[in-house]
Image (cartoon, helix red, strand yellow):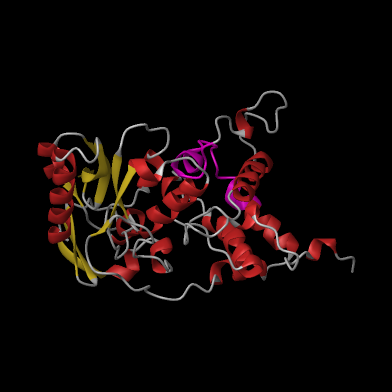
């Protein structure tokens, strides 16, 4: 990935020197191994800070709204899908955006890595082919990359950016087909079992709204949970109110979610949020043949009407 990082640095430096853009949003090395951090570069000489590795998990599309300057962004496949949705919703202007597309081999999940280290601190980590070499005070340990990838990355079908101005690196093929096995397993439960599962899961929620803040699609000027007139949910943490918040959030993402997993990664309590969002992703795909952010020219599923649209809710059994 050093060659890729060098290509990103050179592209960013050139864009800033030629004043093609005013700002480059990418990644820099973080304070922890295998966990990079968003980086905002305005000077050509600062382009050397940019990097790209298996720790660049943030969806940088989240930083593109409400900017009048010309911006370049380093974008993975899931990032570009979010960018497409934001373009379709007129939240960003294509003329003010330069997309540095970067094919992605998948991002590592530090939670999974920490679990494998049994409490030892990770001193360094490096991806070598299909393996990850982890260094601790006790020595080195090699694990399979697929064992520590984010679940989102394992089923990602768009590892290569779907839209870009320049593509750095070779296109990447999906690791496996996405059959929505997690969603189907949840659907196989009885209604009582589903309720129990959701109640148990969301009883852990502390309503910090990190999932909302990390999602590029959650940009309402006032979220319904912050309204006081009317007050939709109470301010205190309660499993029923937690579920209400997540349910409304998921429905708001119907036909818009790029399945980037930003909500899952941001959650400090480790909640499984993707099963709910992916339920709507699967339904929209099966009912309307639509995937969010894949085609800039396609009309969003909820913005288009066809007489042959499935309408089972209108049929009385």
Q: Quadrant of the N terminus?
A: bottom left
Q: Does 270 sit above or below residue 219?
A: below
- Magenta-drawn stretch contains 305: no
- 215 part of magenta stretch: yes
Residue 25 sits in which quadrant? top left
| Rendering quarter of residue 126 | bottom left
**The C terminus - image quarter:** bottom right
Most foreground residue, 297 or 41: 297
- Spot the residue most to the top: 229
Of residue 93 and residue 39, the one placed in the foreground of this image is 93
> Does residue 13 appear to the left or right of 59 in the view shown?
left
Foreground pick, 16 / 137? 16
Q: Residue at x 66, y 67 (%)?
A: 287
Residue 32 lies, with reference to residue 180, above or below; the image says above
Residue 52 x %, y %: 21, 54
Residue at position x 49%, y 51% from top?
Answer: 85
Quadrant position of residue 109: bottom left
| Percent position of residue 223, x then y | 59, 33
23 relative to 33, above or below: above
Task: Return the x and y of residue 117 as percentages of the image width and height.
Answer: 27, 59
Residue 66 seen in the current view: yes
Count of marks, rendered view: 0
- Per the rendered image, the range of residues in magenta is 199-219
> In this view of the protein, can residue 137 be seen by the observer?
no
Measured from the top left, where is residue 176 in percent x and y? Answer: 41, 76
- Left or right: 235 with respect to 314? left
Residue at image coords 37%, 39%: 63
Give above or below for 235 relative to 78: above
């Amino acid at each position: 990935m050093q060659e890729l990082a060098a290509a990103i640095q050179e592209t960013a430096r050139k864009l800033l020197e030629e004043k093609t853009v005013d700002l480059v949003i990418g990644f820099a090395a973080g304070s922890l191994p295998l966990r990079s951090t968003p980086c905002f570069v305005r000077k050509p000489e600062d382009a050397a800070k940019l990097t790209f590795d298996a720790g660049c998990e943030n969806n940088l599309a989240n930083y593109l709204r409400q900017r009048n300057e010309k911006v370049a962004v380093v974008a993975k496949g899931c990032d570009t899908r979010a960018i497409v949705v934001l373009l379709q919703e007129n939240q960003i202007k294509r003329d003010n955006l330069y997309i540095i597309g970067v094919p992605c081999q998948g991002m590592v999940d530090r939670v999974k890595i920490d679990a494998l280290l049994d409490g030892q601190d990770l001193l360094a980590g490096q991806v070598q082919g299909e393996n990850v070499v982890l260094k601790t005070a006790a020595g080195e340990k090699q694990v399979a990359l697929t064992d520590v990838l984010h679940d989102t990355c394992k089923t990602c079908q768009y590892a290569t950016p779907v839209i870009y101005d320049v593509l750095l690196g070779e296109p990447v093929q999906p690791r496996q087909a996405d059959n929505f096995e997690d969603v189907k397993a949840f659907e196989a439960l009885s209604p009582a079992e589903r309720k129990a599962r959701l109640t148990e899961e969301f009883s852990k929620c502390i309503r910090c709204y990190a999932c909302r803040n990390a999602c590029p699609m959650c940009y309402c000027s006032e979220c319904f949970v912050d309204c006081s007139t009317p007050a939709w949910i109470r301010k205190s943490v309660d499993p029923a109110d937690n579920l209400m918040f997540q349910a409304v959030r998921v429905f708001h993402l119907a036909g818009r979610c790029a399945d980037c997993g930003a909500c899952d990664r941001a959650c400090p309590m480790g909640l499984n949020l993707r099963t709910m969002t992916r339920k709507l992703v699967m339904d929209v795909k099966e009912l309307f043949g639509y995937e969010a952010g894949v085609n800039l020219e396609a009309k969003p599923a909820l913005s288009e009407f066809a007489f042959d649209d499935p309408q089972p809710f209108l049929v009385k059994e």
